[in-house]
Image (cartoon, coloured by chain):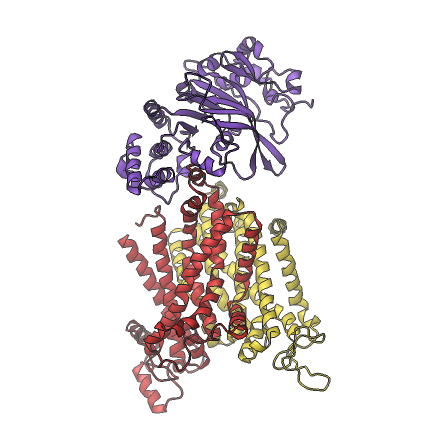
């Protein structure tokens, strides 16, 4: 496992895009940890000017780098604090996606036959499930919280990982080392998890990256549609507040920064994912 | 081919059935009064009782389930809590609005994305390729709702080129009048959401086309096509691009799913009266029959997209044999 | 052969080409001289990686992006191709020089019908209607022994032999004066291989094109070509009439190739040449074959031998070409080559 992670960094570090992505990611992770501590203001506190008047929709200034919201809240602090839910929801969803997707892919590809066709039919069914609407329905019926969001997103996202992993397992299954393991009397469980699983780790890591990117965008979209956890300030919910206030077009400083934050984070994930995929996927290595 | 079609249709029906079942249990097995999601709490107790009987809500769950399935088959989605009108009636027009927004825009996105992606691959290694890839990645990483809002901010508010939202100018046409679709006013309202959605959706086909083209360019038959003295344009579009289109076509199911999912967002920002907006509005008003029907219809579109894309793939690749 | 002998169809002289690698420029072709007359068959032989395919691509003008021509000229029908414009080159492609490629499966586009791929070559160069091009395509397929109605089939519906025939039909579509063939039958079994070459020879008698056959199979050259050029590490090391070259090779590398041929009625095992080709990014200072040559002298490692005339129409690139008659019997003995095995194959630094 350590070797795979080391290989991962070695692979991504080549070329200009991988390192750029890693640096942005590192900054976002630092914000996710330290955001609330280094934010200059309480992100939900109302700010007043020297005369004691509420700072409604104040444009950027030295006190408030990215201006204030309709309720006088500091946008810059909100951006710093918003990194945590984005990465938390994204990361947990990516993790859940990979755990389910990899296992289903492994089992489906390795055993084949009825198990395979059952699991693949199941995957096809999930493939038909409309992504965002499903999550919204689940959230609206079971209550809005980050946990529910992670579960609902994982439920719809494991499907593509399962397909990719299965395809890989189908060819790995025919490899001599699997036959060798079988001859020595290894159990199916041991073959799947000790012989085959390490070989699909790279492709699984690639799908973690793409799941992460999707989860971050989806988390923001749900926040924007107003179905996010009401007690959490996220980049999506900042845009939602602006949108719901009907004042957004008068205050670009309120709307533009959260979008740029999402764009940078997701681009970074794509850069890292593609740089790694380039090395892992021999089909892409040409050209 | 025929038997393949039948089997594939069978899968589709099975998937829809599974989804309908999932919805049934999601909506009914919630804590609280199980009928609360079917019968409007605003009705008089007597009317509520009448409806309870009409929908069989006093019967065991399994019978309710069968009744629910039967109702779905005849497109009976019940009555809206909000308007007390049949849900089916409310949904029809919304479906058309969503399709009018999403389908042309997806076609445009795939066409433009494939052409730009192919050209980027052909001119590989240059600054133009790098900037195309960077721009596409950034656009793809931006949330669609945010891009839509920026577009409104720039083109509608600052430049005053397009209306801010809605499908036609409110009050210009009576509600759900088909003549509005033929008006210039409609096209004027369609333009901005169409452009934003196209721009956002073309990133994926563009990047995919580029990477598959890059692996196609090294093939022997591309070299042979060049040796035959074909012009570069012909080699690019007839030989290289056609092969790269195959993997692109297989992604169509995914992409259509994303586009339908995206329609929820774009319809919200542009107040576009489609299925997605209907669902969001219905949920926020706790109008569950409408929300459920809108969801099932969106699911139907997604599943149908997968089905059509599978057939398309078969038509494009002569190596695929239906058995 | 051209009666005058002075004006050949294809004349390559002093051609050098290199391509860039991560370690630096690799010299793929060095000082290639080749002449091919009208109606003549020339065999170009050498192991894989010796530059045969690069030479063909250079002649066709489809070198990969990282390759370039450093010196020399390629004259086709008296006109230089190296200095020609892209448009002039495109006109020569296929109409003047066509090619029968290696591995016919990858050479045909899987998503276009075989007939379409032949017809498009006709349409690209001749001002004919689609219907006329299609009619000619069907006639071409019939000519190479493929049922014309199969023109609408896709490559995967053809057998390996049929695909190769289709490629030949494609190469002859514009009746070019010169056809290049790059290992045309490697993927096929011996019987099909034989049929293909028989019909290729028949077609040649009928149409009168010249053939440059590139292969690593000496037997194919013996059967099909009156002249042969032996290539090693990007250089021509020996040329001459096939019969003379085979009977009396003038270069130790050719002796080695001949050893590798299975001999009819002989119990002896074929002898392989030990070692591998030299590093072309940093080629040896002397003869490029010296490190693998059992007869190499100090001089061979220090100084590159020039291509010298040794007989009428024969040339060899070897310092010891004059002594070859005494070396040849030794080269037939396995222990001569065994002596090289196990020892370092790197040339001593000069």
Q: Quadrant of residue B19?
A: bottom left
Q: Nearer the viewer, residue C10 or B18?
A: C10
> As drawn, is A42 to the left or to the right of B111?
right
Q: Nearer the viewer, residue B96 or A262?
A: B96
Q: How many discs mark residues in the rendered view?
A: 0
**Apparent colour of chain A:** yellow
> As drawn, is B156 to the left or to the right of A17?
left
Q: Quadrant of residue A249?
A: bottom right
Task: Please give the name of the residue rendered at 44% of the width and 82% of the height, measured from the top-left corner.
Answer: B285
Task: Please give the name of the residue rendered at 39% of the width and 19% of the height, measured from the top-left corner.
Answer: C223
Question: Can residue B224 be seen in this snapshot?
Answer: yes
**Apparent colour of chain C:** purple
Residue C126 pos. (x, y %) = 35, 37
Relative vertical location of residue A79 with respect to residue C129 in this rendering, above or below: below
Residue B321 pos. (x, y %) = 32, 48
> As drawn, is A253 to the left or to the right of C333?
right
Residue A54 pos. (x, y %) = 66, 85
Question: Can residue B24 be seen in this snapshot?
Answer: no
**Apparent colour of chain B:** red
Residue A213 pos. (x, y %) = 54, 61
**Residue farthest to the top, as pictured:** C326
Quadrant the N terminus of chain C occupies? top left
Relative vertical location of residue C142 with respect to residue C291 in this rendering, above or below: below
Q: Nearer the viewer, residue C335 or C31?
A: C31
Relative vertical location of residue B161 with respect to residue C152 in this rendering, above or below: below
Quadrant the C terminus of chain C occupies? top right
């Amino acid at each position: 496992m350590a070797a795979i992670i080391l290989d991962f960094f070695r692979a991504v570090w080549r070329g200009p895009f991988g390192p750029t992505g890693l640096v942005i990611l590192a900054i976002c992770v630092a914000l996710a940890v330290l955001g609330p501590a280094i934010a200059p203001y309480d992100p939900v506190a109302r700010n007043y000017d020297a005369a004691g008047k509420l700072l409604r929709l104040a444009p950027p200034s030295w006190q408030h780098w990215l201006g204030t919201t309709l309720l006088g809240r500091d946008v810059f602090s909100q951006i710093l604090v918003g990194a945590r839910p984005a990465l938390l929801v994204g990361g947990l969803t990516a993790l859940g996606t990979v755990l389910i997707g990899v296992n289903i892919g492994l089992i489906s590809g390795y055993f084949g036959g009825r198990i395979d066709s059952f699991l693949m039919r199941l995957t096809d069914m999930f493939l038909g499930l409309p992504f965002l609407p499903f999550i919204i329905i689940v959230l609206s019926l079971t209550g809005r919280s980050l946990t529910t969001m992670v579960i609902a997103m994982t439920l719809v996202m494991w499907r593509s990982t399962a397909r990719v992993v299965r395809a890989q397992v189908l060819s790995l299954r025919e490899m001599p080392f699997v036959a060798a393991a079988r001859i020595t009397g290894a159990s199916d469980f041991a073959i799947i998890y000790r012989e085959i699983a390490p070989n699909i780790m790279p492709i699984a890591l690639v799908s973690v990256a793409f799941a992460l990117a999707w989860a971050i965008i989806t988390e923001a979209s749900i926040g924007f549609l107003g179905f996010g956890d009401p007690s959490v300030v996220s980049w999506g919910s900042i845009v939602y507040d602006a949108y719901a206030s009907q004042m957004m077009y008068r205050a670009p400083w309120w709307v533009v920064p959260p979008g740029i934050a999402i764009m940078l984070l997701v681009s970074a994930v794509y850069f890292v994912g593609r740089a790694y995929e380039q090395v892992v996927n021999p089909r892409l290595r040409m050209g | 081919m025929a038997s393949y079609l039948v089997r594939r249709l069978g899968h589709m029906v099975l998937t829809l059935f599974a989804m309908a079942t999932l919805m049934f249990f999601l909506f009914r097995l919630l804590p609280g009064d199980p009928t609360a999601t079917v019968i409007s709490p605003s009705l008089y107790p007597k009317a509520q009782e009448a409806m309870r009987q009409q929908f069989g809500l006093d019967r065991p769950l399994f019978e309710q389930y069968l009744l629910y399935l039967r109702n779905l088959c005849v497109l009976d989605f019940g009555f809206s809590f909000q308007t007390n009108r049949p849900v089916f009636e409310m949904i029809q027009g919304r479906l058309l609005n969503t399709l009018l927004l999403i389908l042309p825009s997806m076609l445009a996105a795939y066409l433009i994305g494939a052409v730009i992606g192919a050209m980027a691959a052909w001119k590989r290694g240059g600054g133009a390729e790098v900037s195309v890839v960077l721009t596409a990645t950034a656009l793809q990483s931006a949330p669609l709702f945010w891009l839509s809002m920026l577009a409104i901010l720039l083109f509608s508010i600052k430049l005053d080129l397009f209306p801010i939202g809605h499908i036609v100018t409110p009050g210009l046409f009576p509600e759900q009048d088909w003549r509005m679709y033929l008006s210039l006013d409609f096209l004027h309202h369609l333009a901005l959401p169409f452009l934003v959605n196209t721009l956002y959706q073309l990133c994926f086909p563009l990047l995919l086309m580029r990477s598959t083209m890059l692996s196609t360019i090294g093939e022997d038959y591309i070299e042979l096509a060049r040796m035959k003295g074909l012009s570069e344009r012909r080699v690019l579009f007839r030989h290289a691009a056609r092969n790269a289109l195959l993997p692109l076509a297989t992604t169509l199911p995914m992409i259509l799913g994303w586009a339908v999912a995206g329609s929820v967002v774009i319809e919200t920002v542009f107040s576009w009266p489609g299925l997605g907006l209907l669902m969001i509005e219905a949920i926020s008003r706790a109008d569950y029959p409408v929300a459920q029907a809108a969801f099932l219809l969106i699911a139907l579109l997604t599943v149908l997209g997968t089905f059509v894309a599978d057939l398309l793939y078969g038509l494009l690749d002569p190596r695929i044999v239906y058995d | 052969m051209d009666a005058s002998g002075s004006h050949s169809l294809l004349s390559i002289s002093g051609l050098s080409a290199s391509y860039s690698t991560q370690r630096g420029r690799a010299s793929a072709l060095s000082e290639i001289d080749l002449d091919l007359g009208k109606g003549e068959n020339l065999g170009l032989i050498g192991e894989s990686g010796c530059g045969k395919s690069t030479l063909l691509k250079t002649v066709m003008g489809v070198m990969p992006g990282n390759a370039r021509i450093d010196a020399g000229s390629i004259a086709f029908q008296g006109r230089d191709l190296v200095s020609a414009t892209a448009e002039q080159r495109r006109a020569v492609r296929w109409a003047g020089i066509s090619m029968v490629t290696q591995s016919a499966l990858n050479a045909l586009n899987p998503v276009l019908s075989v007939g379409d791929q032949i017809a498009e070559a006709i349409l690209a160069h001749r001002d004919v209607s689609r219907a006329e091009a299609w009619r000619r395509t069907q006639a071409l397929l019939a000519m190479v022994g493929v049922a014309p109605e199969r023109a609408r089939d896709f490559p995967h519906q053809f057998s390996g032999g049929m695909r190769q025939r289709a490629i030949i039909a494609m190469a002859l579509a514009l009746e070019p004066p010169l056809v290049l063939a790059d290992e045309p039958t490697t993927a096929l079994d011996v019987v099909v291989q034989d049929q293909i070459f028989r019909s290729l020879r028949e077609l040649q008698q009928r149409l009168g094109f010249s053939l440059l056959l590139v292969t690593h199979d000496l037997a194919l050259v013996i059967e099909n070509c009156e002249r042969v050029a032996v290539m090693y590490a990007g250089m021509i090391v020996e040329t001459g009439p096939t019969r003379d070259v085979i009977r009396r090779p003038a270069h130790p590398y050719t002796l080695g190739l001949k050893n590798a041929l299975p001999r009819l009625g002989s119990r002896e095992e074929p002898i392989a040449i030990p070692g591998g080709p030299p590093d072309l990014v940093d080629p040896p200072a002397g003869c490029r074959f010296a490190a693998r040559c059992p007869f190499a002298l100090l001089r061979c490692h220090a100084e590159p031998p020039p291509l010298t005339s040794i007989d009428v129409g024969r040339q060899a690139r070897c310092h010891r070409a004059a002594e070859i008659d005494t070396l040849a019997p030794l080269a037939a003995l396995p222990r001569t080559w065994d002596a090289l095995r196990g020892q370092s194959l790197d040339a001593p630094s000069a």
